[in-house]
Each structure stands twice: as structure tokens, then as C-alpha cells.
Image (spheres, rainbow, N blue to C red):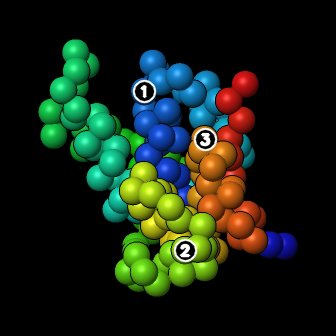
């Protein structure tokens, strides 16, 4: 029997899970409740989540609070940390011809990591399917309603 795929969460999915006021919280929570779900975070996702949680706002968190929230999430069953062992150039090689702008840099890194490591990048961003091209099986776009 084949092990279920490991899902590499992008920043927006992770934030949707952590923030009840996120527009996609319900969709993320419903998916995250999948039995035997295997999921991962990497340094890019962690940094993006911390940056967002600490962004100046009425509900901003301190560094200590934000790291505690992230640490608590990582106690959820099925978690693994995904190290990044390659540079951006190597990871984006399979689909670089479809990259066209600065807003794609982080998404491309995450997609390349998913492809290289046999993970499924889990996102709300449908545009990642185009970026992935023939590697679409490495992307799961969560339905938002």
C-alpha cells in the first residue's frame, strides 16, 4: 500500500489554518481534518507566516507569540519539517520558462521543492497549476466554496 502524499503548505493555507478571521479558514480547516493527512512546512513558509502574524495591525503578535502559534500548529499529527537542499535556480528549472514576474519567486521556490521532493504543494492559488505545467500532480488547489 502506498503512503499518502506529503502536502507542503504555502503561506496562505497556513495562515488560513491559524486565523479564524481568514477568508478561507473554513476551507482550510475542512481539508486539514483529512484522516491520516501528512503535511509539511519549510523555512520559506515559516518565515512568511511569522512575518504576516507580526505585521502591524490591531491583532498583531509579538515574535514570542507568533513563534508559539507556529510551534503549536506543528504539534498537529502528520507534521514534518521539509528542509530545502537546492538553490532557486535548480528547483525552478523544470518550469522556469513559465515564470514572468517578481510575485512568482516564492511560489516558484515552493513548487520546485514540491516537485524535487515528491510533495504536493497545497495552495488556494489556481495560477500555480499553470506554472506547474506538466507537473500539475505536484499541486493541490483547495476549493474555497
Horizontal side of residue 121 vs 89, given as left or right: right
Is 14 situated above or below 119? above
- At a point 60% along the width and 79% down the height, the residue shown is 94
How packed mark 2 is, by other alpha carbons closer than 10 Å (few <14, some 14-19, many 20 or more), is some
User: Mark 3 falls on what kind of element?
Assistant: loop
Is 71 situated above or below 88? above
Separation of marks 1 and 3 at Cα, in angstroms: 15 Å
- At a point 45% along the width and 67% down the height, the residue shown is 109
Looking at the image, which residue sits at the far right?
Answer: 1
Residue 34 or 52: which is nearer the viewer? 52
Is 123 situated above or below 80? above
Q: Quadrant of residue 73?
A: top left
Q: Position of residue 75 (x, y in %)?
A: 43, 48
How packed mark 1 is, by other alpha carbons closer than 10 Å (few <14, some 14-19, many 20 or more), is few
- Visible in this render: residue 123? yes
Which label sits on residue 96?
A: 2
Please name which of the two marks, 2 or 1, marks the residue nearer to the observer: 2
- Visible in this render: residue 75? no
Q: Quadrant of the N terminus?
A: bottom right
How packed mark 3 is, by other alpha carbons closer than 10 Å (few <14, some 14-19, many 20 or more), is some
Count of picture labels: 3
Which label sits on residue 19?
A: 1
The residue that disc 3 covers is: 124
- At a point 48% along the width and 40% down the height, the residue shown is 12
Q: Earlier in the sequence, mark 3 or mark 2?
A: 2
Q: Position of residue 86 (x, y in %)?
A: 41, 82
User: Mark 2 falls on what kind of element?
Assistant: helix
- At a point 60% along the width and 34% down the height, the residue shown is 28
Please name which of the two marks, 3 or 2, marks the residue nearer to the observer: 2
Amino acid at each position: 500500500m502506498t503512503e499518502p502524499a506529503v502536502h507542503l503548505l504555502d503561506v496562505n493555507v497556513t495562515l488560513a489554518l491559524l486565523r479564524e478571521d481568514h477568508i478561507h479558514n473554513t476551507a482550510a480547516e475542512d481539508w486539514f481534518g483529512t484522516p491520516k493527512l501528512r503535511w509539511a512546512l519549510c523555512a520559506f513558509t515559516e518565515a512568511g507566516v511569522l512575518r504576516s502574524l507580526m505585521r502591524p495591525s490591531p491583532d498583531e503578535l509579538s515574535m514570542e507569540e507568533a513563534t508559539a502559534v507556529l510551534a503549536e500548529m506543528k504539534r498537529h499529527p502528520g507534521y514534518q519539517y521539509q528542509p530545502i537542499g537546492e538553490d532557486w535556480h535548480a528547483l525552478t528549472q523544470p518550469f522556469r520558462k513559465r515564470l514572468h514576474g517578481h510575485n512568482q519567486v516564492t511560489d516558484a521556490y515552493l513548487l520546485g521543492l514540491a516537485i524535487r521532493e515528491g510533495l504536493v504543494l497545497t495552495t488556494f492559488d489556481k495560477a500555480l497549476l499553470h506554472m506547474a505545467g506538466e507537473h500539475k500532480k505536484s499541486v493541490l488547489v483547495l476549493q474555497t466554496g
